[in-house]
Structure formats: C-alpha cells, structure tokens
Image: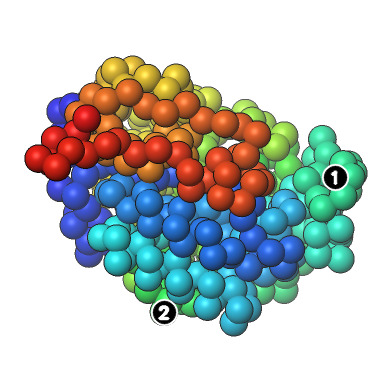
Amino acid sequence: MSGLFDAVPLGGLDLPNRLVMSPMGRGRTTPDGTPLAVMAEYYAQRAAAGLVISEATHPSPIAVGHAHSVRLHTAEQARAWAGIVDAVHRAGGRIYLQIMHAGRISHPDLHGETPVAPSAVQADGTARVFHGTPAYPVPRPLTGDDIAATVRDFAHCARTATDLGFDGVEIHGANGYLLHQFLSSATNLRDDPYGGDAAGRIRFPVEVARAVAAEIGPERTGIRLSPGFRLNGITEPDRAEVYPALLDRLDELGIGHVHFVAGSDPDLVHGLSRQWRRTVIVNLGTGPLDTDTTLAAADKALADGADLLSFGRQFLANPDLPERLRTRAPLNSWNPRFFYEGGAQGYTDYPVLAVSAAGAVD
C-alpha cells in the first residue's frame, strides 16, 4: 500500500488518500435527467474517497446519450445537484462534476433531434432509449456555429457546477463520446480546421478545455482520455501521434489533471503519464473484486507514475472502499442487474464494515 493513503494536493484541495471514485452512470434520474434524492445518499456514502467524480452529466438536451442519464442545464437539475454536493461535503468529501456530450451515441427518442457528431459516420449498435432498441441514426455534422455553441455549453455547465459548490470539473474526452469522436480519424472526416491531421482533430477538445479553464480556473479543470479504447466504435490508428500533441496543448492551458483509462493501450498511457507534468489519474479497469489483487495493481500504477487511482465497480459495491483496502478486508461483489436501474436496490444498500464499540473494524 505504498503511498495509497498519503495526502495529495489537487485543485486547491488536500485529498486524504489517492483513491478516486470513477464516474459511473447509474440511471437514478427522472426522465428529463434531474437527479433523484437517492443520489445524495449514494454519493455521500462514498465520500471517504480522496475524490469523488460524478457520473457523466450532460450540459444540454442534445448532449444526452442514454435514457435516465443525468443532466445539468435547468434550474431544477441545479437544485437537485446542489443537494448532492452538500451531502458529500457534510460527509467530509470532495466532488468534481464530469461533463459529457454523447455526440453520435444518441437517438432522437431522447431529445427530439438528430444527434450531432464531427462527421456523418453512423455508430454500430443500438441506442439505450426509454422504449425499444433502435439503431443509432446517421448523425448530423456539427457546423462551426454548432461547435462554438457546444463549447459555450461546456463552459456554462462548469460555471453552474462550481457555483453550486462542486470542487472542480472533469471534461469527458473518452469512451467514444463527442470529444473522442473528434480525436479519431475514423469518426472525424472533416476537411475544415477541426479535422484532417492531429493538429486539427485535437482542436475542438482543446477549445472545450480552454473555455472551461477560463470559466472556473485551470487548476480545477481536468479531462478524461482513453487512448485506443474501442468503446462505442472508436478506432485510433494514429493515437501515438494524436495524444502527445493533445497533452502538449492541454499543458499550455495549465489544467489540473488528466484522467486516463489504461486498459486498451497501457504502454501509451504509461508514456503519456510520464509526459504530463501535473496530476495524473489512472483508471485500472474493473478487475476482480479481490483486495490483494486491487492493492497490487494500485502499487504498480503508483510506481509507474500515477498520482491518483480511480476505481469504478469497486466503489459501486463498496461504499467504504478506502477502509476495506486499508485494513485488507474482503470486498463486496456487485450485482449487475441494478447497475442502471433499481432505485435504492443495488445502489445504496451495499453493506459497510462493522465497527465495534472499541473502534476496531470487525
């Protein structure tokens, strides 16, 4: 557990450990994406993480990618999020909002419009809508005005978040969603300044990061990236050229952290982690729910240059994950049936370690 429970600075905060709760969409919202009250309990239960990063949150209606995915662009949604932030802070935690635009991974059933993307390249597979399993449609390419409006949406959402009390913001540039679609030569076929070579394809993500950093401060701005991750139909044959160039531009902005998904190209992520001069968060993937395996993977990642480690399903099933790892206690298993639905079931009902009257963990 070398260094795992050391305090670490990030964005003006002092994190009590290096464990980050990874963003995970859980589907506990109203149909219009307003957080349900149970979300406050869920996030507060996990406030012992060094940092909690919220599930991907949409800054506009057309940004929505899945039924019951959460949003932040109305006053009602802001009020609901304010309660969640307050609950996490009262529990002693720290929380960032992750902002995400789904791009082509969307459907008109979710918002009434043709989804947008860098280019008219249809995604394989079926959309997660309220009823049925329709194919993804051919998206509409974003115009220059659309791109400028989308950048403003990200910046406005970031300002709203920090006004509500979020400690910072993470931009979702991974997992095959809109920013990732701009980075890939397979989904970005543009011949304008936002396409073509690596310098063109990184332009839109850099503009989003610049706008958010200008709005809330670069030290409180981060971005999540997944080089080589083929989720949602992304292929990146020239990723070894694209991502170092992207990091150079993000470094010029002084943003506070980069959050890598390491699984698909660990060698590239290792090199990029060494390149980045500020905080590096690495998501190691789910792995087995085994304490010793998790700790060994954490030690290796820290030795390889990570500053913080994000865990998804481990935090999903173990609200008290830091204490379980610190004491080498067994981890709860998860129930995938309730990943995206179920109210409190499979959401806030995972057991925590018993503590005796003398304060020892049982």
The answer to which of 351 and 226 lies nearer the viewer is 351
- The residue wearing badge 1 is 136
The front one of 136 and 180 is 136
Tell me which residue sits at (19%, 50%) in the image.
Answer: 16
Q: Quadrant of residue 262?
A: top left
Give the side of residue 188 with respect to residue 156, left or right: right
In the rendered image, which quarter is residue 231 located in?
A: top right
The residues tagged by marks 1 and 2 sit, at their Cα atoms, a distance apart of: 35 Å
Amino acid type, callout 1: Tyr
Q: Residue furthest bottom?
A: 75
Question: Looking at the image, can residue 340 be seen?
Answer: yes
Q: Secondary structure at mark 2?
A: helix
Name the kind of residue labelled 2 in the image.
Asp
The reply to whether dot 1 and dot 2 touch (C-beta < 8 Å) is no
- Residue 189: assigned label: none
Q: Is residue 159 left or right of residue 220?
A: right
Q: Is residue 199 left or right of residue 22?
A: right
Mark 2 lies on residue: 163
Q: Is residue 320 above or below residue 70?
A: above
Q: Is residue 323 above or below residue 212?
A: above
Dot 2: few (<14), some (14–19), or many (≥20) neighbours within 10 Å?
few
Q: Residue at x 72, y 51 (%)?
A: 66
